[in-house]
Image (spheres, helix red, strand yellow):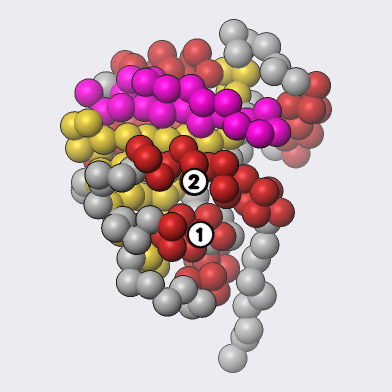
Amino acid sequence: MTVVDKPFSQACENNKQPILSVLAPRFATFRHVLEIGTGTGQHAVYFAAAMPHLTWQTSDLPEHHEGIRTWLADYFGSNLQPPLTLDVTQPVWPLEQTDAVFTSNTFHIMSWEAVLSLLDGCARILSPGGLLVVYGPFNEQGEFTSESNAAFDRQLRSQVAHRGIRNRQTVAEEAELRGLHLSETLELPANNRCLVFTRQ
């Protein structure tokens, strides 16, 4: 039997508390959250433990499932669900409805077409009044907010051409077309933001 090492992201460790400070009051009345792009699984375990009233549904592409399951195996609560296979570009998602969606550090990794597909999917499955919370770096009016973000963008694009930091206003415009209104933009450490969209 192959033993899978538990994946670890220092960035997840660094940003989990600031993100929780955003999520906790906004998810207080919700019962179900879908996390898109669960990654290592660190956020899922931390947030599910901190918000036990929520059913936290993990999801990612299949190649990340084993790593996520190693984190879930050490979780003793009952509100954290094993990962669904979710490719945001597919027309049918494995979940028909949810109160909220959370995604972290995905928009600059996905292609722009995939970002739009994610917004399409969230508009389909979010209940009216539901929230989409997106964490990560964003440009303002087409400009980088820091030199470190500019360097990060160059690194991303050198790895894969379709990657790059997205413009907050452009994302907001596309979301609005889909019935997702950008209700809050919150500054977080290390030149990151949480964008909070409300399903109209």
Helix, strand or loop at label 2? It is helix
Quadrant location of the C terminus in the rendered image? top left
Q: Residue placed at 47% from the left, 28% from the top?
A: 195
Provide the major secondary structure of the magenta segment: strand
| Residue 90 percent across, percent down from the top left | 36, 44
Q: Looking at the picture, does residue 53 appear above or below residue 28?
A: below
Helix, strand or loop at label 1? It is helix
Q: Looking at the picture, does residue 189 appear above or below residue 65?
A: above
Q: Residue placed at 36% from the left, 27% from the top?
A: 197
| Residue 127 percent across, percent down from the top left | 20, 37
Estimate how packed mark 2 is, as few (under 14), some (14 to 19) or many (20 or more) residues with alpha carbons within 10 Å: some
Q: What residue does disc 2 label? A: 20
Q: Are marks 1 and 2 in contact (CB under 8 Å)?
A: yes
Give the residue type that dot 1 points to.
Answer: Tyr
Residue 117 visible in this rendered orientation of the protein: no
Report the front residue among 70 and 189. Answer: 189
Q: Earlier in the sequence, mark 1 or mark 2?
A: 2
Magenta range is 180-200
Report the front residue among 138 and 124. Answer: 138
| Residue 11 percent across, percent down from the top left | 68, 48
Residue 120 visible in this rendered orientation of the protein: yes
Residue lying farthest left? 128
Q: Residue placed at 38% from the left, 20% from the top?
A: 182
Q: What residue does disc 1 label? A: 46
Give the residue type that dot 2 points to.
Answer: Leu
Q: Residue placed at 74% from the left, 26% from the top?
A: 149
